[in-house]
Amino acid sequence: MASTPIASPGAAPGADRSPGAALSALVAAVLAVGIAATAHALQQHAGGGRTLAFALLAGALLGLVLQRSRFCFYCHARDWIDGGDPRGLLAILLALAVGSMGTTVVLGSWVAAPAPGLLPPDMHIGPVSVALVAAGLAFGTGMVVSGSCISAHWYRLAEGSAVAPFALLGTALGFLLGFRTWNTLYSQVIAEAPVVWLPAHLGYGGALALQLAVLGGAAALLWRGYARRQAGAPAIAPGGPAVRPLGAVWQGLWTGRWPYWTGGLAVGLIAAFVIVRMRPLGVTATLGGAARALGTEWGWVPVRLEGLDGLGGCATAPQAQWLTPNALLLAGLVAGAFVAALASRQFAPRWPTARDAVRGLGGGVLLGWGAMTGLGCTVGTLLSGSIAGALSGWVFGVSVLVAVGLGGRAQVALRARG
């Protein structure tokens, strides 16, 4: 990322008065207007135009939040595992808590009396099996190798990341591999695996109370250890005016990164809000669907994938047209992240190296296989599944965390040797 020039006297803190900054801000503003204009035009589309416009705007908002808050499941977990900083994980827990409360309110209006065997439509509630654990472990390992989860690769693509294009290509290859292994896994372990929706067994109140208790307990443990380490740190003397000028507040939005909690709060609200107008939040359906269509056409993917399209998760069934809500959500995510990267001067493309390609492709294959087999990634299965009360989301999340922890320790050991 380019260094920030020293602000002139009297300028708002963090302000950059250079011509390059002004040009970046102007281009970002033009692109933001373009996104809004495109969403307005989409409303006239005959095939659910309002939903398409909503998907584009929701994706743009999500991309903005992800980029500015640096919200990344892998990076947040790594910060805690490597450096003992739990703020990123606390942001994830906050997203899960806020999303759970919002989703419970929405689902309560759809399925008034939850009961076993009765699942809310389109929710990411999948079977719990050994295959799901294997998918989480593979996905977590893929995050360690490639350096990000799939959602972070999408917004880092907008920042000019040299690894992200290879990681997303590798993810598509991993989906192809997952489709080839699906029928065997389905017949052996997935077909008879239980699909557990917690509200069906505990009621909405009981399921929400259980999830909030688990999240609150985890947050308390993380914060307790962090508070102990910070107890001996010198206090930071307050400086500057108590109330910042409006210009300084605006400049602060595009300088550095947003606080961790803002990312967690915003992601949780977006995840709960999108299900009112479209399917639950997910960032792999379009990529997986495209890989499936090409793989089937080229004879790499079985024509019949047993039971797959009847399970809850990020749908990969080939679409009749490319203009789908999930495709526009992804387009909006990348566009919103690009606007944020330009406005904050964090768009820093560079030429990829051979190591970038190997890391991206290798990690991406693991990400793709894990996402296909787990019916989603850390957004689709972990976030959208968990906030809907799906046990599968929690199992996938724990498996991912275990893989990241083991992978982090392996990296430390390799660095010590070399």
Image (spheres, helix red, strand yellow):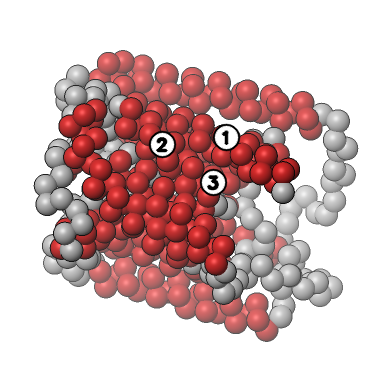
* Amino acid type, residue under disc 3 in the picture: Val
Q: Is the C-beta separation of discs 3 and 2 under 8 Å?
A: no
Q: Report, in whole angstroms, how far the alpha carbon at label 1 lies from the one at label 3.
A: 9 Å
Which of marks 2 and 1 precedes in the sequence? 2
Q: Is residue 276 left or right of residue 154?
A: left
Residue 346: percent from the left, percent from the top?
61, 67
Q: Residue visible at 45% across and 63% down?
A: 166
Neighbours of disc 2 within 10 Å: few (<14), some (14-19), many (20+): many
Neighbours of disc 3 within 10 Å: few (<14), some (14-19), many (20+): many
How many numbered dots are placed on residues in this image? 3
Residue 283 visible in the picture: no
Residue 292 occupies quadrant: bottom left
* Amino acid type, residue under disc 2 in the picture: Gly
* Amino acid type, residue under disc 1 in the picture: Gly
Q: Residue visible at 23% across and 24% down?
A: 193
Q: Secondary structure at mark 3?
A: helix
Q: Vertically, is 46 above or below 110?
A: below
Seen as rendered, the residue at the extreme front is 417
Report the disc number at residue 136.
Answer: 2
Q: Secondary structure at mark 2?
A: helix
Residue 375 occupies quadrant: top left
Q: Is residue 332 left or right of residue 185?
A: right
Residue 194 visible in the picture: yes
Report the disc number at residue 144.
Answer: 3
Which of marks 2 and 3 precedes in the sequence? 2
Q: Report, in whole angstroms, how far the alpha carbon at label 1 lies from the one at label 2.
A: 13 Å
Q: Is residue 367 left or right of residue 247?
A: left
Residue 245: percent from the left, percent from the top?
71, 61
Which of marks 3 and 1 precedes in the sequence? 3
